[in-house]
Amino acid sequence: MGGTPVTVAPRDDVAADQGGLCQKGWTAADLLDGPDRLTTPLRRAHLGAPLEPCTWDEALDHIAAEVGRLQREHGRDAVAVFGGGGLTNEKAYQLGKFARIALRTSQIDYNGRFCISSAAAALNRAFGMDRGLPVPLTDIATAGTVLLVGANVAETMPPFMRHLSDQRRNGGTLIVIDPRKTATARQADLHLQPTPGTDLALANGLLHVAIADGLLDEAYVAERTTGFDRLRIAVNGYWPDRVERITGVPVTHMREAVRLLAGVQVTGVPAERGAPGHNRTALVLTAQGSEQHASGTDTVTAFINLALALGLPGRPGSGYGCITGQGNGQGGREHGQKADQLPGYRKIDDPGARAHVAAVWGVDPEIIPRPGRSAYELLSALGEPGGPRALMVFGSNPVVSAPGAAAVEERLNALDLLVAADFVLSETAARADVVLPTTQWAEESGTMTNLEGRVLRRRQAVPVPAGVRSDLEVLAGLALRLGAPGTWATAPAEVFDELRRASAGGIADYSGITYERIEKEGGVFWPCPGEGHPGTPRPFLDRFATPDGKARFTPVEHRGPAEHVDADYPIFLTTGRVLAHYQSGAQTRRVNPLVDAVPEPYAELHPDLAARLGITEGVLLRVTSRRGMSIVTARLTDTIRPDTVFIPFHWAGTGRANLLTNPALDPMSRMPEFKVCAVRVEIAVSAVGEGVTE
Ligand SMILES: Nc1nc2c(c(=O)[nH]1)N[C@H]1C(S)=C(S)[C@@H](COP(=O)(O)OP(=O)(O)OC[C@H]3O[C@@H](n4cnc5c(=O)[nH]c(N)nc54)[C@H](O)[C@@H]3O)O[C@H]1N2
Ligand SMILES: Nc1nc2c(c(=O)[nH]1)N[C@H]1C(S)=C(S)[C@@H](COP(=O)(O)OP(=O)(O)OC[C@H]3O[C@@H](n4cnc5c(=O)[nH]c(N)nc54)[C@H](O)[C@@H]3O)O[C@H]1N2
Ligand SMILES: [Mo]
């Protein structure tokens, strides 16, 4: 693909990036003016007709007319909105406002439910605040031990590796928990390789060992936490042998992990790489491997319990954090595109929050709807009796990325109106009735909040192509046609000023942050309640964000995967990412060097498993779960457990991992169980006529 070689990263995550760009960053510029770039609105003349170019007025008038008709006939909630954690703060804020006071629908949620929702719920429960990393990234270098749970940062966040190298150079150790010996695990001093879906038992087992071996920080537990007595009883039952049987992790490895976290010398690890016990610093970090489970919130809670018992949170270079994924994974979850949320991380059912935000929006609080459905529940209600009949998608490609994708596709097809705003014709946009071509990262300005809670500027680097509009312009155009109250600014700076006021007094308070300050100070950490306030890089130093200032222990029990292996589906499937592709692949599958790097969907399997099934490298496999079938190429590797296969989720069509995944939801976060389900693996003998070709 040709194009102006603009060498800018798609995210301006300064500390995480520190000048190091990953492959996706270098090639993202290819998409700016590639042949697949959308530059004109598209619409279908009628159901079943092809998408054809139309004018912006035709597209927006048509949407407004259909929305009006559907809401008159079926009520306000007949129209739904689906957002994304890649949107800037300004866009995420405006999308939430658009849903609540232009559409007046409760039916809005976003792909962050599929991403950070379990960690967010656990953070709120333990600390009273959902802040991904409660310390700056540069603190990693000073941590005696870093524990990564289900995080393959070498592939998913290459710039992060620099912090880990600094940490190791300073004598620190790295522990990785992952069913696969990933590029990240290969760099670890200790790799624990559990069966997918058993991390909660493992964390409880580690805590059991810490208690038994007298490695708790008793003074910290007494002073800074509540609820330890109940927890101590709960983890009694997680004696090491039992946990070894559940997880497959040897008892010796568990003991070593606990000793490293507690800063006790471990044999086999060079002496210069163990932190002294009286000065323990350790970071426990989780990512999707431990979070994307039907027990994800409790699993993260179990790791937070461990970190608290060791006295880590609230100390520099120490604590618990989650590694937020999308470009604006942190900010995207703070300003109201979530079903139960208003800007500033306020709760939509809190009367005080409603009154404050309504005043900023210039509306009566009564018109703000109540909480709506969570992402997967929303997608599965589409076109059902009582469910939404129209959906507007901004920044997600659920046809590929939602669990149980075949069922989701059916629901999208059952809609009266599907609208997609995107810069490429994603698989979701290709099914839409109206497609709106929008600006992408280098063509617009705004702010993003990185995993440290630091608000950063995104600056426009190239002009907007003719025919393309920004998401803010699209929302303003629709709000106008719908006769919405309030003002609908299209300049990001103006929207940010409104966001500041709407967030004032909330948990994620941005009121003291200005574009000028961000520029001058290289980013500002929230909460920042006034222009004279320095911002908050380490929110938990003195107290946690709970009413009594103490962190809360919550006892949690191992439940195991929602779906167990059996005679029909005897193998675990787990899913995730590879370096060369991004998310649903809508962008990276259009960039030749990335396609060349990893051209087709595949399944990783252990040579022992392959031998048992008569599978050889490169053959076409049929992988079947209770939800569907996926066709992928076999890749043999001894870095994976012999009872588990791994399929990356970046491809569309018959190679979709999400044709297989289990939409069992976490009861608190409503996160689907992307990371474990039961499958059968066979050679796809007769490829033709069995759904192998789409
Ligand atoms: N190249 C690339 N980078 C990305 C993305 C991308 O699509 N491509 N996406 C971005 C986004 S939105 C996100 S959220 C992040 C995600 O970043 P990560 O969480 O690092 O990515 P994943 O590959 O989904 O999962 C990480 C690891 O979890 C392991 N795992 C699977 N099941 C289990 C389990 O039961 N327990 C444990 N402990 N581990 C398990 C997998 O083997 C995998 O290596 O990456 C971001 N960066
Ligand atoms: N099996 C399995 N499934 C998963 C996961 C997994 O690990 N395993 N991970 C889950 C996770 S963590 C995530 S985050 C999701 C991600 O999956 P999706 O939610 O599908 O996210 P993307 O693929 O990034 O899709 C973003 C779409 O929006 C467009 N877009 C990007 N920026 C903008 C913008 O500013 N405005 C507009 N209008 N459009 C934009 C892009 O071109 C693309 O088509 O997938 C989830 N699905
Ligand atoms: Mo994500």
Image (spheres, rainbow, N blue to C red):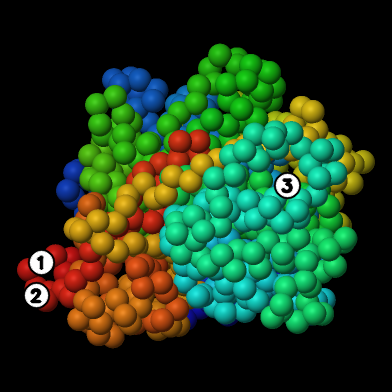
Query: Which of disc 3 and disc 2 is earlier in sequence?
Result: 3
Report helix, strand or loop for mark 1: loop
Q: Quadrant of residue 352?
A: top right
Q: Please tell me the numbered disc located at residue 686.
A: 2
Say if mark 3 contacts mark 1, CB within 8 Å: no
Q: Position of residue 305 (x, y in %)?
A: 66, 46
Q: Considering the numbered disc 3 on the image, is that residue within a helix, a strand or a loop?
A: helix
Residue at position x 29%, y 76% in the image: 609
Residue 127: percent from left, percent from top: 71, 39
Check disc 2 and report its element: helix, strand or loop.
loop
Q: Which mark is residue 565?
A: none
Distance Cα–Cα, label 2 vs label 1 = 7 Å
Report the side of 127 relative to 170 (left or right). Answer: left
Q: Answer with left or right where residue 58 lies relative to residue 184.
A: left
Q: Earlier in the sequence, mark 3 or mark 1?
A: 3
Tell me the distance, in whole angstroms, between the alpha carbons under discs 3 and 1. 53 Å
Which residue occupies 82% across, 38% down?
Answer: 222
Q: Which residue is mark 1?
A: 690
User: Where's residue 390, x and y in %?
Assistant: 33, 35
Distance (Cα) linking label 2 and label 3: 55 Å
Residue occupying the point 47% across, 71% down = 180
Is 605 rendered above or below residue 441?
A: below
Tags 2 and 3 touching, CB below 8 Å:
no
Which amino acid, by three-letter code, is at mark 3?
Leu
Please give the residue where the numbered disc 3 appears in the rendered image.
Answer: 308
Name the residue type under label 2: Ser
Point out residue 89 in the picture as x, y percentages from the top left corner.
Answer: 64, 46
Q: Is residue 32 above or below residue 418?
A: below
Mark 3 is surrounded, within 10 Å at the Cα level, by few (under 14), some (14 to 19) or many (20 or more) other residues, namely many
Query: Which is closer to the viewer, label 3 or label 1?
Result: 3
Residue 647 is drawn in which quadrant?
bottom left
